[in-house]
Image: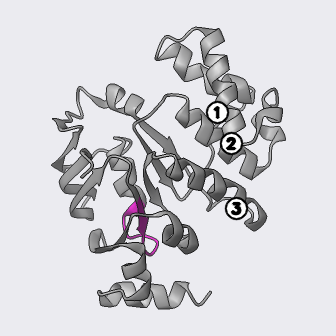
């Protein structure tokens, strides 16, 4: 059995008096791909942002490689181990594609510019966008920008990649080019948590599907079990609605 990479226990989060995450538990194994699905407002994005400490949580604990994470001390180190790709691309508009990729490795990890550029070009080739290396983000399509964002996250050599609905801001014809990069990443053995509405991707790539509703994980199953025979009434209703579209 693979070792545990990330462990979340009784995670609680509030926005004021609104209880958005109600005691979530999750164990993520090395090399595992988990897809988190559910209706809008169910807490999916808050959950994944809390893992990366972009959102403060008010109760529970998180362990990474078995080590308890102290949000007051360990955030910067943790973010070097966790890559994050957002709905919006969040690229630096004043930097070229190549400069976007080498900024963090040189500033944070202390890589030489030459080594960082070599690594960046390898990653741009991996996401099939090498020819755009000297362009600025505004000159790229949405799909190209998101592939750059994935490469930029990989440049820090993370142990786990978090994706927060990475295709939701894309035109339909650009979605497949981003999903293909993510499928390749999953096949390479990268540990991934993906918040997504792309049910075909979840069915094909996930080791586990987690269904969230109203701040709770209400069902957890293999893709075959979840899509063929969901157990929870809320899961059944969600699938009946989303798969009819």
Q: How many labels does the image show?
A: 3
Which secondary structure, mark 3? helix
Colour scheme in use: one colour
Residue drawn where x is 54% and y is 35% of the image: 154
Q: Earlier in the sequence, mark 2 or mark 3?
A: 2
Q: Residue under label 3, please give it.
A: 176
Q: Which mark is residue 207?
A: none
**Seen from this angle, which residue lies furthest front?**
1
Q: Earlier in the sequence, mark 3 or mark 1?
A: 1
**Mark 3 touches mark 1? (CB < 8 Å):** no
Q: Distance between the residues labelled 3 and 1?
A: 19 Å
Q: Is residue 245 above or below residue 64?
A: below
Which secondary structure, mark 2? loop
- Could you say which is closer to the camera, residue 221 or residue 233? 221
If the image is split into quadrants, where does the C terminus sit? bottom right
Q: Distance between the residues labelled 2 and 1?
A: 6 Å
Q: Residue 127 carries which label?
A: 2
**Mark 2 touches mark 1? (CB < 8 Å):** yes
Residue drawn where x is 52% and y is 14% of the image: 107
The reply to whether residue 237 is in sight is yes
| Horizontal side of residue 86 vs 143, given as left or right | left
Q: Is residue 170 above or below residue 134?
A: below
Pinpoint residue 194: horizontal percent, then vertical percent: 46, 57
How crowded pointer 1 is (Cα within 10 Å; few <14, some 14-19, many 20+) is rated as: many
Pinpoint residue 150: horizontal percent, then vertical percent: 59, 42
Q: Residue under label 1, please give it.
A: 123
Quarter residue 46 falls in: bottom left
The reply to whether residue 196 is in sight is no
- Could you say which is closer to the camera, residue 95 or residue 206? 206
How crowded pointer 3 is (Cα within 10 Å; few <14, some 14-19, many 20+) is rated as: some
Which secondary structure, mark 1? helix
Which residues lie in the magenta part?
Answer: 34-44
């Amino acid at each position: 059995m693979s070792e545990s990479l990330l462990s979340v226990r009784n995670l609680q989060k509030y926005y004021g008096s609104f209880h958005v995450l109600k005691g979530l538990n999750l164990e993520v194994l090395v090399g595992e791909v988990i897809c988190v699905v559910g209706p809008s407002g169910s807490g999916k994005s808050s959950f994944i942002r809390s893992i990366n400490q972009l959102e403060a949580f008010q109760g529970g604990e998180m362990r990474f490689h078995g080590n308890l994470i102290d949000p007051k001390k360990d955030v910067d180190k943790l973010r070097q181990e966790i890559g994050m790709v957002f709905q919006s691309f969040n690229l630096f508009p004043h930097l070229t594609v190549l400069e976007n990729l080498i900024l963090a490795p040189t500033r944070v990890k202390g890589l030489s510019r030459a080594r960082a550029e070599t690594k960046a070009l390898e990653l741009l080739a991996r996401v099939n966008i090498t020819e755009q290396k000297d362009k600025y983000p505004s000159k790229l399509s949405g799909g190209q920008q998101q592939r750059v964002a994935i490469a930029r996250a990989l440049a820090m050599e993370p142990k786990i990649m978090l994706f927060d609905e990475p295709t939701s801001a894309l035109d339909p014809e650009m979605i497949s080019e981003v999903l293909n990069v993510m499928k390749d990443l999953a096949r390479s053995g990268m540990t991934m948590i993906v918040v997504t509405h792309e049910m075909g991707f979840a069915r094909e790539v996930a080791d586990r599907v987690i269904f969230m509703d109203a701040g709770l994980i209400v069902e957890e199953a293999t893709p075959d079990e979840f899509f063929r025979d969901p157990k929870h009434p809320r899961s059944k209703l969600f699938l009946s609605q989303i798969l009819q579209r």
